[in-house]
Image (spheres, rainbow, N blue to C red):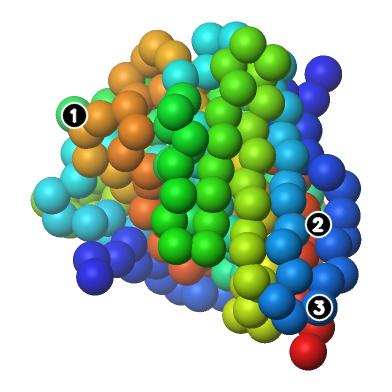
Amino acid sequence: RKEVEQDPGPFNVPEGATVAFNCTYSNSASQSFFWYRQDCRKEPKLLMSVYSSGNEDGRFTAQLNRASQYISLLIRDSKLSDSATYLCVVKLYGGSQGNLIFGKGTKLSVKP
Amino acid sequence: EPEVTQTPSHQVTQMGQEVILRCVPISNHLYFYWYRQILGQKVEFLVSFYNNEISEKSEIFDDQFSVERPDGSNFTLKIRSTKLEDSAMYFCASSGTGSNYGYTFGSGTRLTVV
């Protein structure tokens, strides 16, 4: 049973393209949701939290559908520097701070 | 920007040896974590630590693993007798309070067991 499942990728897009990533999670007790990005052989870095009402940060828009247990990330006007692996992450309710459950990630490659 | 610091960046050890991975979390964070990522796999939770004790641990975190906060700044992960399958990137992370508070990860220690 995959707790957090993502598009397998890779996504190869030209600069300026709009690209969307999808993610589903299996545990309805999931409390908080995030997108992280990970560059090759580097640590995950928080890109943005995902709120129920949807939220935007510059070129990045995240959506959450709790009923469908579905999360998305939209990147507009993609840049070469957006090339990375995008990790969908959920935090489970309960425990001290819960813990983060990572998807395997979707690799994005933005070409000139 | 505050950061989580990990040392060493790369550790090579022989099977059966003990290793200690070190981390300095962000100073005003209260929650500390270890995660690992085997090459090509997803990031996996190992253990969380709060108020000087383990608050949660995964199935991976068996008796070979232990964590310690020996002083006010360091947070260590010890693997008592390393196995080949322990080869991975080990990430330390810390967080403040609040459910929507993301974790800050260190740059990781690449452990290679030979």
Q: Look at the picture and state if A80 lies above or below B114.
A: below
Indicate the secondary structure of the residue bearing disc 3: strand
Q: Amino acid at mark 2?
A: Gly
Tell me where residue B73 appears, x and y as whole percent: 17, 56
Foreground: disc 1 or disc 3: 3
Q: Residue at x 55, y 43 (%)?
A: A62
Q: Nearer the viewer, residue B77 or A91?
A: A91
- Pointer 1 with pointer 2, Cβ within 8 A: no
Which circle marks residue B40 in the picture?
2
Dot 3 crowding, Cα within 10 Å, few <14, some 14–19, many 20+ = some
Marks 1/2: CA–CA distance? 33 Å
Q: Residue at x 13, y 49 (%)?
A: B28
Marks 1/3: CA–CA distance? 48 Å
Foreground: disc 1 or disc 2: 2
Q: Chain of mark 3?
A: A
Using the rendered view, name the quadrant where residue A90 is placed.
Answer: top right
- Pointer 1 with pointer 3, Cβ within 8 A: no
The answer to whether tags 2 and 3 share a subunit is no
Dot 2 crowding, Cα within 10 Å, few <14, some 14–19, many 20+ = few
Tell me where residue A66 appears, x and y as whole percent: 58, 16
Looking at the image, residue A87 sits to the left or right of residue B21; the answer is: right
Q: Look at the picture and state if B80 lies above or below B55.
A: below
Q: Quadrant of the N terminus of chain B?
A: bottom left
Determine if residue A7 is in view. Answer: yes
User: Which residue is denoted by mark 3 in the rendering?
Assistant: A14
